Amino acid sequence: MDSVLLQAVIYLTAAVVAVPIASRLGLGSVLGYLIAGVIIGPVIGLVGSETSDLQHFAEFGVVMMLFIVGLELEPQSLWAMRHKLLGLGGLQVVLSVLLIAGGGVLLGLAWQVAIAVGMVFSLSSTAIVLQTLNEKNLMKSEGGASSFSVLLFQDIAVIPMLAIIPLLAMPGLSGEGGEHSGGDVEGGINLVAGLAGWQQTLLTIGAVAFVIIAGHYLSRPVFRYIARSKLPEMFTAVALLLVIGIALLMSMVGLSPALGTFLAGVVLATSEYRHELESDIEPFKGLLLGLFFITVGAGVDFGVLMENLGVVLAVTAGVMAIKALVLFFLAVVFGIKGSDRWLLFLGLAQAGEFGFVLISFCLQSAALPVELSRILLLVVALSMLLTPALFIFFEKIIQPRMVRKQTRESDEITEQGTVVIAGHGRFGQVVNRLLLANGYKTVVLDLHADLVESMRVFEVKSFYGDASRPDLLHAAGLHEADLLVVAIDDQAAALTLIDHARRERPDLHIIARAYDRRNVYQLYQSGTNDIVRETADSALRAGRYALQALGMHPVDAERAATLYVNEELKGIRQLAEVYDPDIPVAQNPRYVKLALEIKARMDTAMLSGKFPVSHEHPEEGWRPPGNTVVKE
């Protein structure tokens, strides 16, 4: 018991110390866990042989992660990605196995061993890649979605690989793997052992069907029953039981637990209990994945690494280069461009956690020699250790350059109008449509090429270009226009644009969109005539609805909203005079004093003589909502 507690303290301390430091340095949590494992393992020797046993336990974090991924992916979304799942993922696995195996044969390996090595290295790390993509908000990008498709297919491909590996057994290797037994596939209940082929197939299909049908028809009544108990810990227990039970069932019929829980997650993606399941599983997933990464770092055998340093480095570089080339080729074939292409082939170039499982299984099946397996284990671990560095290289070097490279030349502006609109996003589009509908001619500039092209499909003409550039503003007719509308997202660029326009045209009427109060003050000080906070109108409307919902007559609610707007505008102008961009507003005494005075003035105005609530309304038949009873 004491030793278990001591190990727990060591692992948790390593994580608590290393991960926040790595995150603060911009290295990501995965690299933090890996470094923590290297420090407490090979470097100072606080943990040792138990890391391999812990790793098998911690791999359950991958199972939970795929369950959560499935929860966020409805069946329709999964069906929509079928082409990339089968095409991109399938070709990646096949080509990687063939090329890596071919390289192995050239290096003198028997073809059976070479194929086994190819299968081990064809898989990538679901744990590292998905965790990193989520942390960096890249899952929704084309590169992130394509990476997910490949990883999902790889999880499926583990099943036929486990079936093929025993066929690669070599008589000369029999008995070598005895001491390495202890993988995932032995020691448990195997429902398909001893069955005929058709019986195994039938049982496997039955298990998958049971997961789908039970998930669809039984989960809701069970969750509803548990929810009525009003015991949150029971819901957590049911969530864990669901994941562990499905993983066990899949293992018993020879399927991947991760694949089974992913399928269950997809089935439950439309359930009203989806978010509760996700929040209950998330902490366990995070801790187990962190433990898994620590064990990978702690499991690096520095003795074997030093003896075979050149070989390990060369094989690691070779494997990652081959996989990167395969993924680059497939990205070109499937039309993945720009930074998404780089994200795909840099992100998936490593070997993965299933590589540990396959190496262990290969040893048991006499498909790999022991000495080679030790080097392969190091190659898998080293490639996983290098992956966070590749993501940092992508984020810091590739992504900024690709964004600049993808920037095309500005359009030649061939028209001029009464109004120049800078920015044609969701805000600028509404302004432009209203002006066009009323017969005004506009010249619209926007920096997003895709948006400009898509607007032209709907016969809304706009020009691609950076509106903050003086030459483009002049070409758009700054000196002839009656009005300038600034609706771009970049606040600094908007201020630069307005400063230039005001210098060139002191008489020009300028309307600008503001992000928040701070931006309002900046725009006010730059000389903007009309400032519109992008969410102010919708919030004001919501507030008016709230007053009506509480029983206020619509006319009174409208008057209250109008009075509020007038007082608010008056107050913002006064606050803008004392606003200092170098001092936080809460630490600016003049600002705080004036803000409190304006608040008191607003309260007085709303509740007293400035706003007499009218009891004579033109509308007939209006009744307060809810259960309020109004006497006739």
Image (cartoon, grey):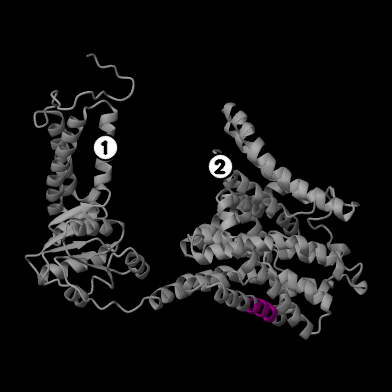
Q: Which residue is mark 1?
A: 543
Q: Is residue 34 visible?
A: no
Numbered circle sitting on residue 44: none
Answer with the quarter of the image where residue 422 lies: bottom left
Residue 355 appears in view: yes
Residue 251 at x, y = what percent?
77, 51
Q: Which residues are magenta?
A: 313-322
Q: Nearer the viewer, residue 405 or 360?
A: 405
- Whole-number angstrom distance, CA of label 1 to CA of label 2: 31 Å
Helix, strand or loop at disc 2?
helix
Q: Which amino acid lies under the numbered mark 2 shown in the image of this protein?
A: Arg
**Residue 314 is inside the magenta segment:** yes
Secondary element under disc 1, as helix, strand or loop, is helix
x and y, in percent, of residue 276 in the image: 55, 40
Instruction: Please state the total of marks drawn on the protein image.
Output: 2
Q: Does residue 524 sit above or below 166 in this rendering? A: above
Q: Quadrant of residue 294?
A: bottom right
Q: In the image, is 16 to the left or to the right of 288?
A: left
User: In terms of sequence position, does the residue under pointer 1 or pointer 2 come before the other?
Assistant: 2
> What residue did someone put label 2 on?
274
Q: Quadrant of the N terminus?
A: top right
Q: Is residue 51 left or right of residue 547?
A: right
- The picture quadrant where one finds residue 376 is bottom right
Q: Nearer the viewer, residue 365 or 478?
A: 478
Q: Main secondary structure of the magenta part?
A: helix
Q: Which x, y percent locates residue 271?
A: 57, 40
Indicate left or right for 92 with 77 as reference: right
